[in-house]
Image (cartoon, rainbow, N blue to C red):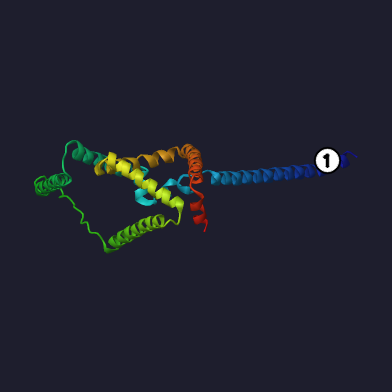
Amino acid sequence: MAGHVEESVHAEEPVASDVEGTCDCLHSSSSDSEDEKFEALATIAEEMIWRFFGRQRPIHHVLGGGRSADIFLWRNKKISSGILASATATWIFLELLQYSLLTLVCYGLILSIAILFLWSNLSGLFRKAPPRIPQFIISENLAQNIALDLRSEINGAVSLLRDAALGRDLRKFISVVGSLLVLSIIGNCFDFLTLLFTAIILLHTLPVLYERYEDIIDGIGEKAMAEIKKQYAKVLSKIPCGISKFKRQ
């Protein structure tokens, strides 16, 4: 009798283990489904976030990727700091010390050539290798690519001005005229060299700050764009009905 009871107990143990295994499987499957749902919701939330430039890609891809984006985002700190230091020194010499651009370029070339000349002639006395000056040649493919890119940019700008002048899009007309007014005001306040130096400083600071505080800046930008759209709608509502009828036709 006792042996029969022991056999029944041993027979029930696998059933209990099977139940536990089934529960673990159900728990793992439910947790996996919850994780998948959470990831899907997170993806949808990221897509719904308002981004500058109407993008869903990282700022590195917006800047074109490659070396130029690495320089603006300080991925290569030596090159970025060198460009920024050179631009600052050039602006100081041209603006504060009142050097002309041609004079500064000639002085820089004279100093560089003199240093390399002395190094080449004195290297034999000190038993050191002469300087290795690489031969810089602009290839035909590079020149053609630069010309094609410049051509497409010029054609796009001319087409934009033409569409704004023909009155095909009122929004485009207002944006073009507003941008030109802003540029004229900025050009009246600063000379070309200071404006170019300011643009270099902004290109080396704003992308890095935006990449670091992307979510905060996008939130502020979303509120600002909503307010701009409200003011733009008010301006359009004050335009006479004849223009709106002409645009509908």
Check disc 1 and give the amino acid type: Val
Say which residue appears at 60% left-offset and 47% top-offset: 40
The percent position of residue 137, horizontal first and vertical second, equals 22, 59
Residue reaching furthest to the right: 1
The percent position of residue 49, horizontal first and vertical second, equals 53, 43
Q: How many marks?
A: 1
Q: Nearer the viewer, residue 223 or 230?
A: 230
Q: Nearer the viewer, residue 214 or 181?
A: 181
The percent position of residue 199, horizontal first and vertical second, equals 31, 43
Q: Nearer the viewer, residue 14 or 19?
A: 19
Q: Quadrant of the N terminus?
A: top right
Report the residue marked by disc 1: 9
Q: Secondary structure at mark 1?
A: helix
Q: Nearer the viewer, residue 94 or 119?
A: 94
Say which residue appears at 60% left-offset and 44% top-offset: 41
Residue 14 visible to the viewer: yes
Residue 200 visible to the viewer: no
Residue 161, quarter of the rendered image? bottom left
Say which residue appears at 39% left-offset and 55% top-offset: 165
Classed neighbour count for the residue bearing mark 1: other residues with Cα under 10 Å, few (<14), some (14–19), many (≥20): few
Q: Is residue 145 left or right of residue 101?
A: right
The percent position of residue 61, horizontal first and vertical second, equals 42, 50
